[in-house]
Amino acid sequence: MLRWGILSTAKIAREHLMPAIGKATNASLAAIASRDLERAQEVAAAFGIPRAYGSYDELLASPDVDAIYVPLPTAQHTEWTLKAIAAGKHVLCEKPMGMTAADIDRIIAAAKDARVVVSEAFMVTYHPQWAKVRELIADGAIGRLIHVEASFSYHNVDPANMRNRPELGGGALRDIGVYPLVTARFATGKEPVRVRAKVVTDDAFGTDSFVTGTVDFGDFEMSVYLGTRMAQRQTIVFHGEDGFIELAAPFNASLYDGDKVLLHDRDHRLTQTFRFPGADQYRLQVEAFGQAVDGNGSVFPLESSRRNQAAIDALFTAGQTGDWVTLA
């Protein structure tokens, strides 16, 4: 049983990762830390966690913890991932793992030196619906892929929320832009060649609140829009010569809508539906992480995290210049 320590009482930890660890067959909740000891003790009592700490450093020093989950604000991800690695812990860090690709370069080097498992928490890549999409594309179910269309939006005007605070790494591209990119890359096995974008900065908060982008993968193109002041929506469609694939809930499976993949033929006369009832992408992620620590599996690789972040960096640059930005 991999013994997990949770670095903060963040909402995503309470609602998703901590329940997933509780359900996983190879994991246990060992400790939680908060800068407010009473808050840590409160959450520990609610989840049956045996140890609560009033500082993150105390948790990292604990001999009773094997792996750390980092759900802190984005701007703090690299700092505390590196500190956890230095403490000899395995690390699962919320996305995006860094503010720039250079941050992830530092994490890659540190993880290699420490010989620990470190991964970015792209839970979507563990959901069987995405394995099915990848299989359908590889098998030629839609013929030659020509275009991917994606959207991700929500409405959040809370000035205290980290998503609306630039100093904490808030904004649409880092918070939700990572998902269309990573899933398109995962499903196709292809990497972006160049990008262009329009990035609108919110007057009140100073974060990027609306983004439209074009990502050129060489063999196909992806168009995407993101918004933090819009009605809630998430979509993705893989459109080929002989048909197209769409997902009912591409990123927040089970929470947003039913887990299903739809395969439409060229004439839109036939639709096949693939369903995945009961799949919990957070639990699958936790179990895969534990298997990787045991040497019996793999996790989302840091090198892929680095490539995803490089594309986000390029979209920011393209939004400033108005020109195509080529990825190395």
Image (cartoon, rainbow, N blue to C red):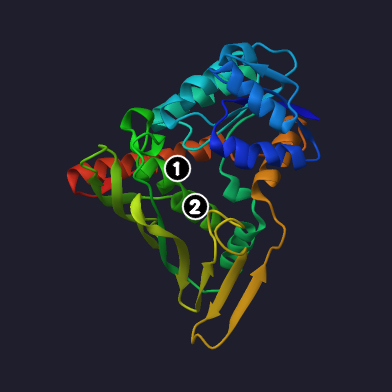
Residue at horizontal 59 percent and vertical 16 percent from the top: 37
Tell me, for residue 185, which label it has, or none: 2
Q: Amino acid at mark 2?
A: Arg
Q: Nearer the viewer, residue 186 or 283?
A: 283
* Left or right, 164 with reference to 83: left
Q: Quadrant of residue 172?
A: top left
Residue 252 percent location from the top left of the image: 55, 54
Residue 189 percent location from the top left of the image: 53, 54
Verify CB contact (< 8 Å) between mark 2 and mark 1. yes
Q: Nearer the viewer, residue 181 or 151?
A: 151
Residue 184 percent location from the top left of the image: 48, 56
State the separation of the CA atoms marked 2 and 1: 8 Å
* Left or right, 152 with reference to 42: left
Quadrant in which the N terminus appears: top right
Mark 1 sits on what residue?
308
Q: Badge 1 local density, few (<14 within 10 Å), some, or many (20+)?
A: many
Residue at horizontal 57 percent and vertical 63 percent from the top: 257
Query: Quick check: 91 above or below 324?
Result: above
Q: Quadrant of residue 86?
A: top right
* Left or right, 239 with reference to 3: left
Residue at horizontal 40 percent and vertical 63 percent from the top: 220
